[in-house]
Amino acid sequence: QWIFLAGEFVKKEDAVVSVYDHGFLYGDGVFEGIRVYSGNVFKLDEHLQRLYESAQSIMLNIPYDKEELEQIIVNTIRKNELETAYIRVVVSRGPGNLGLDPASCSQPKVIVIAEALTLFPKELYQRGLRLGSVSTRRNRPDVLSPQVKSLNYLNNILVKLEANQAGVDEALMLNDQGYVTEGSADNIFIIKNNTIFTPPVYLGALEGITRNAIIDLAKTNGYVMKESPFTRHDVYVADEVFLTGTAVEVIAVVEVDGRKINNGEPGNITNHLLSEFRKIVTIDGVA
Ligand code: PLP
């Protein structure tokens, strides 16, 4: 396996970064997770746009323009001879001194990892996920914007740890006002009386690329689709609940805080959207 690391391809065993890299010391950097379906990079423009916006927000200068980085990503996939893959793009502030001031870091590091995809087990999609709400709140948009996919994911990690402790599959994260925002690294949708709802991003959800694709698909398939705030109660009494994300695609939720959703079975609309999503992934990409 070949990793693109700071300008060249190196073997996985040799792909190491300095202990002085501020990505390592402080979580100072940004990243993206992208999928390749049958040789097509799904929504690459959207992922690159979000990466450059995350970098702009934290004043991190990516040493390539978008076209160059796109080419690097495509080359990494080709070099590893992958057809179906998961790509991780990381841009760290680079090595500096031990102080946290990024001014000591003169060379941001770009890393592209392309791996054969390990699919989530089929049984999980058939069974559906159990969710538990957690006490850790989504970070407020007026501090570090939830739109920045930074290397500092401690908040989301705390959320995941709480879910693990509670013995559920995934977390339900609220914002500081108690409105539902998202999971630990996936967006949430609920369905009530055939209307599909997802939280507006201003509440604190990341504007997921899968989320946006599902919003589009819901509309083109004739569903009423609304971005509006909802609470845990609305999730408990929903007809269907599902999560979206680059890794999980679309996955049903069948239990939330012990309340069964749709009698504990993945719902029909969820299954319909998942099958529609699987249809677009190979055509809506960069070959
Ligand atoms: N929310 C968070 C916090 C995430 O890190 C991710 C993963 O990227 C998502 C949601 C889902 O976004 P996407 O569909 O772009 O993968």
Image (cartoon, rainbow, N blue to C red):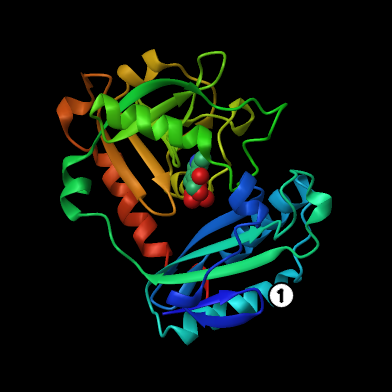
In which quadrant is the N terminus drawn? bottom left
* Residue 275: quarter of image: bottom left
Identify which residue, 41 or 106, lies in the foreground.
106
Residue, x 64% and y 25% (percent of image)?
140
Does residue 99 appear to the left or right of 208 in the view shown?
right
Residue, x 34% and y 37% (percent of image)?
242
Q: Amino acid at mark 1?
A: Glu
Residue, x 74% and y 43% (percent of image)?
100
Q: Would you place residue 137 above or below residue 3 in this image?
A: above
Q: Would you place residue 242 above or below residue 176 in this image?
A: below
Does residue 208 appear to the left or right of 238 in the view shown?
right
Q: Position of residue 70 (x, y in %)?
A: 64, 74
The furthest residue to the right: 103
The furthest residue to the front: 98
Q: Is residue 216 visible?
A: no
- Look at the numbered disc 1 and say if its residue's Cβ is closer than 8 Å to ligand 1: no
Residue, x 49% and y 77% (percent of image)?
14
Q: Which residue is mark 1?
A: 67
Q: Would you place residue 147 above or below residue 48 in this image?
A: above
Does residue 12 appear to the left or right of 51 in the view shown?
left
Q: Is residue 153 visible?
A: yes
Q: How many marks?
A: 1
Q: Position of residue 51 (x, y in %)?
A: 66, 56
Q: Secondary structure at mark 1?
A: helix
Q: Position of residue 201 (x, y in %)?
A: 60, 33
* Residue 49: quarter of image: bottom right
Crowd class of label 1 (few under 14; some 14 to 19; many from 20; radius 10 Å): few
Q: Position of residue 277 (x, y in %)?
A: 38, 56
Identify which residue, 68 or 271, lies in the foreground.
68
